[in-house]
Image (spheres, rainbow, N blue to C red):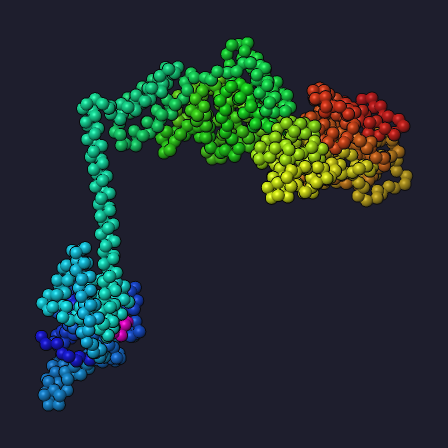
Amino acid sequence: MTIPDVFPHLPLIAVTRNPVFPRFIKIIEVKNKKLVELLRRKVRLAQPYAGVFLKRDDSNEADVVESLGEVYRTGTFVQIHEMQDLGDKLRMIVMGHRRIHISRQLEPEAEEPEAEQNKGRRKAKRGRKEAGVSAEAVAGLEVPGGGPGEVLMVEVDNVVHEDFQVTEEVKALTAEIVKTIRDIIALNPLYRESVLQMMQAGQRVVDNPIYLSDMGAALTGAESHELQDVLEETNIPKRLYKALSLLKKEFELSKLQQRLGREVCVCIKQTHRKYLLQEQLKIIKKELGLEKEDKDAIEERFRERLRGLRVPPHVMAVVDEELGKLGLLDNHSSEFNVTRNYLDWLTSIPWGKSSEENLDLARAQAVLEEDHYGMEDVKRRILEFIAVSQLRGSTQGKILCFYGPPGVGKTSIARSIARALNREYFRFSVGGMTDVAEIKGHRRTYVGAMPGKIIQCLKKTKTENPLVLIDEVDKIGRGFQGDPSSALLELLDPEQNANFLDHYLDVPVDLSKVLFICTANVTDTIPEPLRDRMEMINVSGYVAQEKLAIAERYLVPQARVLCGLDESRARLSPEVLSLLIRQYCRESGVRNLQKQVEKVLRKAAYRIVSGEAAAVDVTPENLQDFVGKPLFTSERMYGATPPGVVMGLAWTAMGGSTLFVETSQRRPRARQDGQDGQGGQDGSLEVTGQLGDVMKESARIAYTFARAFLMERDPDNDFLLAAHLHLHVPEGATPKDGPSAGCTIVTALLSLALDQPVRQDLAMTGEVSLTGKVLPVGGIKEKTIAAKRAGVTCVVLPAENRRDFLELPGFLRDGLEVHFAAHYRDVFPVAFPAQPRALALQR
């Protein structure tokens, strides 16, 4: 069929991804019903031609565009060779012939009946013979009506190439394109069929640069805009160059694909070969008896671990049963790994294996004194433990709990105890722990299950009698996974831990030889059943003298080693350390003191290295250059306490401290003449300072007792009956609670009522009952340390705390005038020595 050279009016088919190049065949599917009907009618009218144009947006799947701006203006004039109706779409095989360019969109016209169309064709045919009117012009009138905004018919012009000569450049480009195509075919045989199909016309491609450039571009998988750029190019040398660029990219991509495929193939072959060789080697060794199967080797290794250990019979029965199960399982099954891990843990426990314990008292005492200063209660208890073990001829486990403020050495003394006893040391913290499985282990049914911390301890230490430190036992949590503090009940019970049952092992383990040491800051948050199982040992804070000795013996030498200094290059005198303790580090422990000493030595090292000084001598005068301004300038809020203000002694988790109680009159009292002081009074007491419920109750009790005490001592003084008073405990941002301020509150109220200040060097503590009895309180050592730190020389303590005070070291008791009071009448003459007569109440 002869293809017309000019055919200006064509249906527009919009395609995506790849344009159609001249002389190339393409399969196109059309779904738009109006366009399908138009194409069918054109074929029936023996006009099987259309214009194929590339859409600018590849994501647009429509066959028909709404405006010419959605397609590139340059496309291809194609002939429809075959049509296949697929129901909802039309599949066509088209062949490109020449490049065309859209000049304008044709307006759709109403469809004419077929008879009229035939008549029009005959008239058109006669007209061509007579008047030379082209058939294409008539065909342009036969356009069906399209939908709103749909471009179905366009008027096109043929694209004319620029004239060119077959120069050396064109020949070189042509030869390079042919060579590149051959290289691509050599790398990937799939391109061979495409090239053969393109060359089926039988024409020599090399003789036609136009066709060769189109063939090179059509062969690649370049981007749509790059292919369209080749289609629109009218300069043949430039088109050849662009096609060559696309072919070179395709060639490099083919080389990369081939290299990746080759590497993957080699890797697979090597893995397969290695697997075959390993299997053959196993069979050869098995035939020669040189090596047993994996299962036999695993069983032999597990039994070798247990050889020489005193394994209980019930545990050995479980091991034999699990080894028998292991032999029946496939090596690649998940159950095989679970059983092997279980046996690994079961055979890693040191059944019956203990470290040789040190029973030499002198050596143990020397080790303890070498590492820590003070802490006499702890050291005495450990030496008692060694003495009992020496008399019995065997060691036993024990559960101790060290409690006290932070930084006093509770955790570090445990390591020294382990060294003194020659025991292995293991530490784990339960602070914030919310999962029982951390202690008791996980069930074996879970993925990644493992035993608890205690079984891990036995595996790591390889002895049955290690020293286990359970840190922060007062901060243990509670979550939906259980209550770990309840799990510790079995672990820390000497009657039960001889048969401790871990969830993972599920066999009893003897922990009776383990020495458990727990640490805590406070005992209030430890559950009572757990506290009952432990021997509580108080590790109280340090006074200034003890801190100075610790700094000189331990902290300064350790800090010098850390900073790379010696005593000759950085000198810290005892006066500097005392000033550092007094003005920067008043807490009970020495952790902050250690930080400040390291800070001083770090700055000294900087000055030496920078060349500012060859040696640094830290003195009280230049101490602020190293650590800044003092944090504490005075312990006492009042140099001389006015009437209504009394110093009390308090105890916190950080140690002891002084606490002032202030009282004042809110407004003038309204007393009416003629009253006898026994009725009509409306006095009140307001309490502030963020006090807890217990302390508020203690304030009300003290207020009631003070009114009664003053009435019996001085009936004419009705100040407490009629006055509106305000009681405040300073540092309102700090919560305060406890009953030990009763004596202090009564004394402050009486001082305000008598308008007389108390003794200036006095501090007191003690709970007061409603009848005036002074009840015992806790924290005597910490409160005594706080009193000495504040420069107090006279202290009032409850009579029942006499034993606690006498147990204190001599240097703490020296310089203190202590009065023990059983009733408040014993406190009054000490607080108000200027009163002419003491009150003697007979109850």
Q: Nearer the viewer, residue 238 or 588?
A: 238
Magenta stretch holds residue 150: no
Identified at 22% across, 40% down, the residue is 270
| Residue at horizontal 52 percent and vertical 34 percent from the top | 432
The picture places residue 827, in percent across and down from the top left corner, at 80, 26
Q: Quadrant of the C terminus?
A: top right
Of residue 32 and residue 781, the one placed in the foreground of this image is 781
Where 600 sits versus 365, above or below? below
Is residue 162 visible to the viewer in this orientation of the structure? yes
- Going 75% across and 22% down the picture, which residue do you hit? 799
Instruction: Tell me where residue 333 appears, x and y as whole percent.
Output: 27, 32
The residues colored magenta run 71-76
Above or below, 297 against 593 in this view is: above
The quarter holding residue 824 reads top right
Q: Nearest the camera: 803 or 483?
A: 803
User: Residue 413: image x %, image y %?
Assistant: 57, 25
Location of residue 638 in the rendering, given as x and y in whole percent from the top left corner: 78, 38
Instruction: Give the vertical position of 583 relative to 153 (above or below).
Output: above
Residue closest to the eye, 658 or 243: 243
* Quarter of the figure with residue 28: bottom left
Which residue is farthest bottom?
A: 130
Task: Examine the rendered structure and indicate whether residue 624 appears above or below residue 823.
Answer: below
| Residue 596 visible in this rendered orientation of the protein | no
Please give the name of the residue rendered at 30% of the width and 24% of the height, measured from the top-left corner.
Answer: 298
Q: Quadrant of the N terminus?
A: bottom left
Answer left or right for 524 relative to 633. left
Residue 254 as seen in the image, left or right of residue 826? left
